[in-house]
Image (cartoon, rainbow, N blue to C red):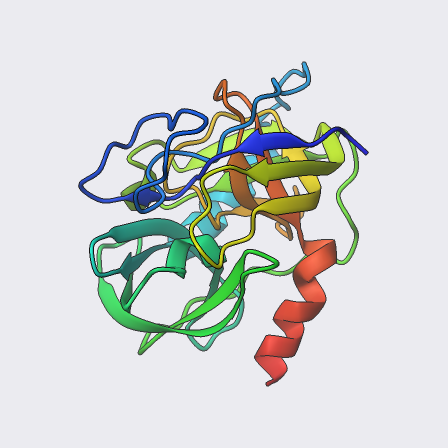
Amino acid sequence: MAAAVLVVAVGVAAGSAAGLALTGQPRPGHTGRRVSFAPAPSASPASSGVGLQQVAGEDLPEIVTVVAVGAQTEELGTGWPVDGHGDFITNDHVVNEGLSFHVITASGAEYQARVVNSDPQLDLAEVQAIGLEEAPLPIATAPATIGLSVVVLASQGATGHAPVTVSLVNGLNERASVDDAQPGELTDYTDLIRIPAHIFPGNSGGPVLTPQGQVVGILTLAAKNGTGAFAIPLAEVGPVIRQWLQG
């Protein structure tokens, strides 16, 4: 298991600074990215490949911007459909401070939403968009492996950057600690997947997909130097998501 690293947030509060949050700086509404002291291990990005590009093309229209409006903040994150009934998965730290919620589709349509399930200790949340039905992304049944080619999808409306990032898995069982978590949020992460990818504010909650189009991780943290990212493995939280949907 890798040594623990210190991180700050990947979500972004609209109207606040969207740049890199410095270690030790308080997080006003999750401004900036979750950032690590430790540089990402050296690795070359995976070849984009026909499989990953096809996956991105098929699934990107299903990705939404999750908007959580709080008393003084408006938090933006990424959500992906987990069933055909308007349920989307994102991070708990995206919705933690929200008082009202809505999602925005890739086409720009807006739907009112509500948080139906959340688990701060897993940094996991289920948001239900009222009246919106998207084709669900399949969940991987096998855990990620070192060297696995992956593609990370994000809502361009949340990040302001290209929504597709092709990379690979170069770390497993990673640990990280958040120095600017808000009350009630997870501060110590374990068993994370590490990816040498450059990500941006708003990537939180985005799916990490295999060449077969299966979600193998949920993006949640970024490396301080901007060249690494961490994801929650679906092998760990998949059973919780399935239980939520059955409930």
**Count the marks: how many?**
0
Question: Is there any visible trace of residue 212 in the rendered image?
Answer: yes
- Locate residue 172, reporting x and y percent: 76, 36
* Above or below: residue 247 compared with residue 89: below
Please tell me which residue lies in front, 44 or 180: 180
Is 108 situated left or right of 181 in this image?
left
State whether residue 163 is above or below residue 24. Answer: below
> In what quadrant of the picture does the C terminus appear?
bottom right
Q: Residue at x 22, y 64 (%)?
A: 110
Residue at the extreme left of the image, as rendered: 15
Q: Is residue 103 above or below residue 19?
A: below
Q: Relative to 107, is 37 above or below?
A: above
Q: Quadrant of the N terminus?
A: top right
Q: Quadrant of residue 162?
A: top left
What x and y, as percent, mark residue 41? 68, 18
Q: Quadrant of residue 164?
A: top left
Res. 104 visible in picture: no
The spot of residue 100 in percent (x, y) is 26, 69
Q: Residue at x 31, y 26 (%)?
A: 19
Give the residue at x 71% y 27%: 170
